[in-house]
Amino acid sequence: MHRFFVSPEHIQGPHVRFSEEQVHQIGRVLRMRPGDHVIVLDDQGWEYDVRLERLTRYEVEGRVLARRPATGEPRVRLTLYQALLKGQKFELVLQKGTELGVTAFVPLITARTVVGSLGGVRTNRWRRWQRIITEAAEQSRRGRRPTLTEALMFDQALLQAQQQNEMLLIPWEGADTEPLRRALQQQGPLPRSLGLFIGPEGGFEPTEIEQARQAGAIPVSLGPRILRSETAAIAATAAILYELGEWDGEVGPTSS
């Protein structure tokens, strides 16, 4: 069944209204008709069984038949601090990270990041990235859309991560790193919130790794092979969520 995130204000009692973009998708792309059923998510932790009742060229309205807690969210909050990448590589990280269970994305500007200023990402790209996240969340049966913040400089991101996460990890190819799995196993009680830092195509500067250490981040290894940045982000996310038990088959209600 097709799933759509809508703004909470578009759900008024038993009535649901869809956005202009969704009207086009429902009527023109999917060619749905009155009587068809969809799942609507309010991004607040609830999902609704909805029957479409009124479809025109400009409007689609539906009626709520049932309401229940949304499922599909991980128990651990994983924030991915991803260095900006060229071309569509960053978009791939957003899409696959959403599918895997990332809770929040923070675009990162580091010493070796190609984009040289924050202004370079405050354009139409941010809206496109939001759309990619929404579509991936709908496809993968997420109960909430991961948040996407404005880009931060590396030092700003470290400060934020310190304040919001119990554990910080920064994959690096240096010699004094420990395997990712061992770092997680030595944590003791499993962290409820975790920040993952992934560098750009050229990797992190050694001074940035030292800065991260001083902020409490643990440099970890992802194995003997050197991975591209987008591959490292996807592989590390999957490995962390697997190790923390998020792939055990149990899916619970989404939480705040």
Image (cartoon, helix red, strand yellow):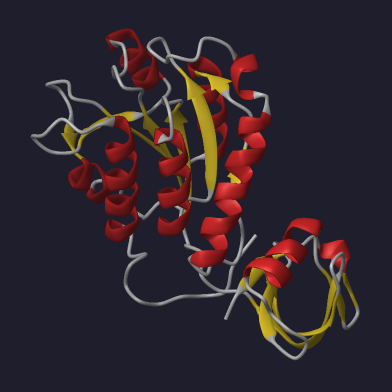
- Residue drawn at (29%, 44%), measured in percent from left and top? 236
Q: Quadrant of the C terminus?
A: bottom right
In this rendering, position of residue 103 left or right of residue 245: right
Q: Position of residue 35 (x, y in %)?
A: 75, 91
- Residue drawn at (53%, 40%), measured in percent from left and top? 105
Between 95 and 209, the one lying in front of the other is: 95
On screen, 24 above or below 93? below
Between 120 and 110, the one lying in front of the other is: 120
Identify the image quadrant of residue 178: top left
Q: Position of residue 58 (x, y in %)?
A: 87, 64
Identify the image quadrant of residue 90: top left
Which residue appears farthest toward the right when viewing the image? Answer: 12
On screen, 18 above or below 176? below
Q: Position of residue 218 (x, y in %)?
A: 30, 31
On screen, 74 above or below 198? below
Q: Position of residue 136 (x, y in %)?
A: 51, 57
In this rendering, position of residue 125 left or right of residue 229: right
The reply to whether residue 166 is visible in this rendering is no
